[in-house]
Amino acid sequence: MELIPEVIYEDDVLLVVNKPAGMIVYPDGKHDYPALSHWLDKRYGAGKYHFVHRIDRETSGVLVVAKDEETHQFLKEQFQDREIQKTYRAFVLGNLKDERGMINKSIGSSRGGSGPRSAKQPTGTVREALTIYKTLGRGLGTTYVEVFPKTGRTHQIRVHFSAIGHPIIADVLYGAKGGTRLLGFNRLALHALSIAITHPNGKTMTFSAPLPQDFLTAEAELRKA
């Protein structure tokens, strides 16, 4: 089945899409995954857009694209100044006892250089990272959480929940035994739900990506538990 992003919002300088799980943002040169950049090339032409941020291939949800360099820089500064508000949903392994929590653990490389990240024994360039969460539900060996990353480190949410012993369901990179699969998830149980930015016109705008079917099914299973 062809993966096609859903356009959430578009104007002369901004595009916001709901990226489906399984689509990589930009080709990694190692795999032949469907790429959001290829879809954008066909729609706007190569070099006619700029990624402001990225989300993992298996993560679904909202992603902002700038249509010109001026908008790109304007939004990039908001990310750097931590003015962007991002909200995710995730199912994690085990029972998170706290209704609300904060994970304040610096992140670096797990073995030097690129590749997997670590908040347990970070090496190389180590950067501060902060993730806040609240619990939405529990059951069937999982906890359903809403997550608010306050920094934007690579794989931050995945690394942080793994570091506290509650990796995201079906996370093959940071999960227990290569990613425990529960609630029917065949991909990383992480969804970028919403993002709030200041538009170049000065208005604060919030964009949301509806929960995909696998999340809706998991929610229903949790309610029945």
Image (cartoon, helix red, strand yellow):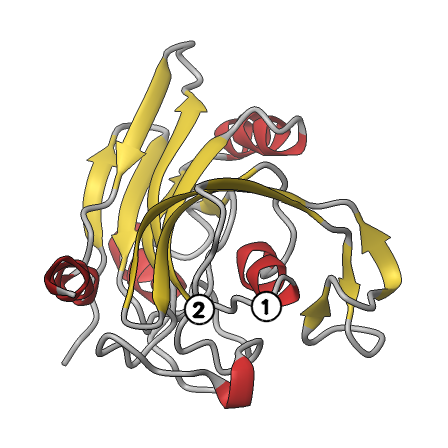
Q: Nearer the viewer, residue 181 or 85?
A: 181
The mark found on residue 165 in the picture is 1
Q: Is residue 190 visible?
A: no
The quadrant of the picture occupied by the C terminus is bottom left
Disc 2 residue type? Gly
> Residue drawn at (28%, 61%), measured in percent from left and top?
42
Disc 1 residue type? Gly
| SS category of the residue bearing label 2 | loop
Considering only order in the chain, which callout, 2 or 1, is on the residue closer to the N terminus? 2
The mark found on residue 94 in the picture is 2
67 w.r.t. 159: above or below: above
3 w.r.t. 210: above or below: below
Query: Residues at badges 1 and 2 in contact (C-beta under 8 Å)?
Result: yes
Mark 1, Cα crowd under 10 Å, few <14 / some 14-19 / many 20+, is some
The quadrant of the picture occupied by the N terminus is bottom left
From the viewer's perspective, is 21 left or right of 169? Answer: left
63 w.r.t. 217: above or below: above
> Residue drawn at (18%, 67%), measured in percent from left and top?
214
